[in-house]
Amino acid sequence: MKLLKFDSLDGMKRLNFINVLQVSFERLSLIPTMLFIIPLLLISCKDKTLKTGYIDINLINQEYKLAKEYEKHIKSIENNYAADLLGIQADLNILKDSIDIILDRNVKPSQELLAEYYQKKIEYQKYESEILENVPDSVKYYREKLNNKINELVFEFAQQKRYDYVFSPAGSGAFMYGDSSLNITREVLAYLNSK
């Protein structure tokens, strides 16, 4: 920046006037350019309605055929464990009743009978712990597998139908309301079940 020395206040005012005039002229020359750019921006930024829909994931989980298959499979796992556990418990009850009958006669039960009873009791507790660990693991495994498949197919569906957004409000906390006209659950369900 170059410093200028003025002999009078008039010289300084004249220079200031020239600077203001020059800046104004530069800005005026930008007006035609801006008049061309602004409409282009407005045209390119016009309102585009986004195609949006939502699905009721609870309904999907109830009516999607893969969800039903997984639910049936999980129930069979639970039932098999329960049947095995009931068998062990029945054996344990028989041994306990035998010990009680012997004790009622004021006779001491044999060491073999007591050992068998305690062994069966340990087997029952071990198997019960195994159930408490394996059933939730199985449920988690199949739930994750199901969710991944649903997400994959909903993504495919949304791309094919050119949706910008597909939400799943149930339990997600993402949003609390959706206009029922945006509910595409039945359409998505038909698509999922066709795969």
Image: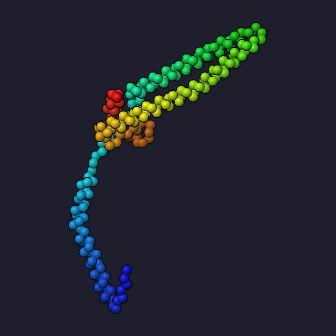
> Measuring 53% from the left and 26% from the top, which residue is drawn there?
135
Corner quadrant of residue 172? top left
Residue 66 at x, y = what percent? 40, 27
Q: Classify residue 117 by image quadrant.
A: top right
Residue 186 visible, this angle: no
In percent of width and height, residue 105 lies at: 76, 8
- Residue 38 shown left or right of residue 94 in the figure: left
Depicted 146 relative to depicted 164: above or below? above
Residue at the image point whose x is 65% and y is 15% from the top: 92
| Total marks in image | 0
Which quadrant holds the N terminus? bottom left
Hey, which residue is sitting farthest bottom in the picture?
7
Establish if 179 lies above or below 102.
below
**104 in relation to 38, above or below:** above
Identity of the residue drawn at 26% across and 52% down? 46
- Which of the 4 image quadrants contains residue 39? bottom left
Viewer-closest of 75 and 100: 75
Residue 173 screen position, x and y as percent: 44, 41
Tell me what residue is drawn at x 22 percent, y 64 percent: 35
- 173 vs 191, left or right, is right
Q: How is the image coloured?
A: rainbow
Q: Residue 39: in sight, yes or no?
A: yes
- Residue 6, horizontal then vertical, whole percent: 34, 89
Give the vertical position of 100 relative to 141 (above or below): above
The C terminus appears in which quarter of the rendering?
A: top left
Q: Is residue 73 left or right of residue 156?
A: right
